[in-house]
Image (spheres, rainbow, N blue to C red):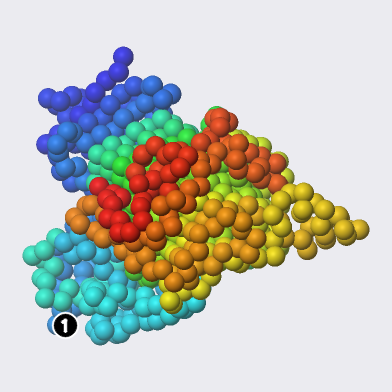
Amino acid sequence: MAFEYHVSKNGSVSAQGTKQDPFLTINQAASVAVAGDTIIVHEGEYREWVKPKNSGLSEYRRITYQAADGEKVVIKGSERIQDWEQVEGTVWKVGIPNGYFGDYNPYIEEIFGDWVVYNPGRHLGDVYLNGMSFYEAENLEQLQNPEVRTEVLDHWTQTTVAVVNPEQTKYLWFAEVDEKNTTIYANFHEANPNEEVVEINVRKACFYPENIGINYITVRGFELCQAATPWTPPTADQPGLIGPHWSKGWIIEDNIIHDSKCSAISIGKEASTGNNYRTKRKDKPGYQYQLESVFLAKQAGWSKEKIGSHIIRNNTIYDCGQNGVVGHLGCVFSEIYNNHIYNIGIKREFYGHEIGGIKLHAAIDVQIHNNRIHDCSLGTWLDWQTQGTRVSRNLYYRNSRDLFVEVSSGPYLVDHNILTADYALDNHAQGGAYVNNLIRGKMVQRKMLDRATPYHVPHSTEIAGFAVTYGGDDRFLNNIFIGDDNLEKVGTAHFNGYTTSLEEYIETVHQDEGDHEAFNKVEQPVYINRNAYLHGAEAFEREEEKLEATDFNPDLKIIEDGNEVYLSLELPEEIASFFGGIQSTKTLERVRIVDAEFENPDGSEVVLDTDLLGKQREEKSVIGPIASLQAGKNYIKVWG
């Protein structure tokens, strides 16, 4: 028999959990709820790390945690601090006994782990003034002089960036920890911290099981924030502010999630499959430890039957230092959609190779669609074993980069998206199909001949083989490419010299007497046709049917109006009669290395007949992400 438990700020630790006699904490309910039960949390702030104890048993016998209808429920990893002492001018301090933090003191714990590139001693703690997070100073002197700024080189864009936002340079904190106390100093400018709401990070997470295998949990309708989450590379334990911790079948929906020091939602791996061994042991490259983690995961039960198949939908995720959604291995067979993700990795207090609005490794059969992702260091990064993955009908804008696919062999689909960053696409992979996208920005395409990565039996975690990234084996069909006076490498011209069919590729390879060496020398086939190239975008030299209007400036703009977003775009007259047809499993060439077709996760035929707005495509629909695009001026609502 299913029970309904209630939690209220008016409850008690000795309550029965009924509506009339509610629990005081969510963890009280979490300790007794079993499969089929629902936990309803009533209005208020709950400063606790919710640790679900019991597992649901199936999609139909879940344990559901939800905010009461119409009531605002906030779960915080922070505590309010009110005993501040003025030191000098606008700088205040507070002393806190180390025991206050238990065995996890965020002001001792540093940003640490594999692939951290830049960290000048930053910690997992944080200070918030009326909800606004501060920046950690590198020393007390900098705290007294908040205009001091540090500049670093962004490894990927090769540009110099400030690690402190000029608008917030005055809001800094610094901590000193001795054997007994943690002393936090902060520059509050005009504010008196004892008269405002000042909070500090205390807990590692807000909603995250301590044990693995806590399956079929639903978390709905909460605000979750202010957690001291650690750095989450693919070779480490990956705790987030909220997440399933190596489990199956979670639904995380309709939540507002923000101010995680590193990652917000984690659907990633756990510690037994590797935990920052490259950084700790220093005896092997991180690449080698990541390979080992895949095999260790198989030994730990990594399969569709036990892991993944999560749903992340209708959430608003913002102001996090590393990721909005992160996962390695544990993300398989999941669906991420209708989320609004922004302000991820832009404070630049620290950075590394694992930052993005969505950053996934081994995204097998993961479906990422209908998300709005903007103002992120990187919009979506799919790394290793991107297979059966589909990135569809997403809106990307004002990101440093929009989409990055790395060392994967496909098949993966990128269709009906809008990508508008100056640096729109990093393609360090093979076996992709890019169909009906609007891409305004440069594309960087690279081979990776020194890092073989796994590929799988289709729709499975079973490993079928390993391959390096030869480059190519990509399909670019029905896309609109838009250049700019200040941009290079927009379009598909970087594939010049590649073969255009498997037959041509095989014939060319076998002109050489060697074995694997010959495959390194010959460019894989690419399938490029029926694309439009505007405002300086350049076409692949062997593309047979294309629309070129290189002098035409579409004057593309993404316009925000409240929660609504509009696309403003002008198109040339020729676009009205330039059709691409509907692409599907039947029209997309199979992927060479994996020897697999482009399919839906259930193995059925995939048909790309639904545009970004959810409208049905016709055979004679205009190319690009929106079937109703027309010659001349377009002004179309694309979100909200």
- Name the element at disc 1: strand
Residue 217 seen in this snapshot: yes
Picture coordinates of residue 207 (x, y %)?
34, 43
Residue at 69% from the left image edge and 54% from the top image edge: 500
The residue that mark 1 highlights is 88
Q: Is residue 198 visible?
A: no
In terms of depth relative to the viewer, which is nearer, 326 or 211? 326
* Residue kind at label 1, given as amino acid type: Glu
Query: With 18 as the anchor, is 582 left or right in this view?
Result: right
Give the left or right position of residue 414, taking residue 16 as reference: right
Left or right of 371? Residue 25 is left
Residue at (66% x, 42% y) in the render? 590
| Rendered image quadrant of residue 528 | bottom right
Which residue is drawn at the image coordinates 70% and 47% (left, top)? 592
Residue 255's place in the image compared with 520, above or below, is above
- Measured from the top left, where is residue 134 in percent x and y? 26, 69
Q: Residue at x 32, y 26 (%)?
A: 33
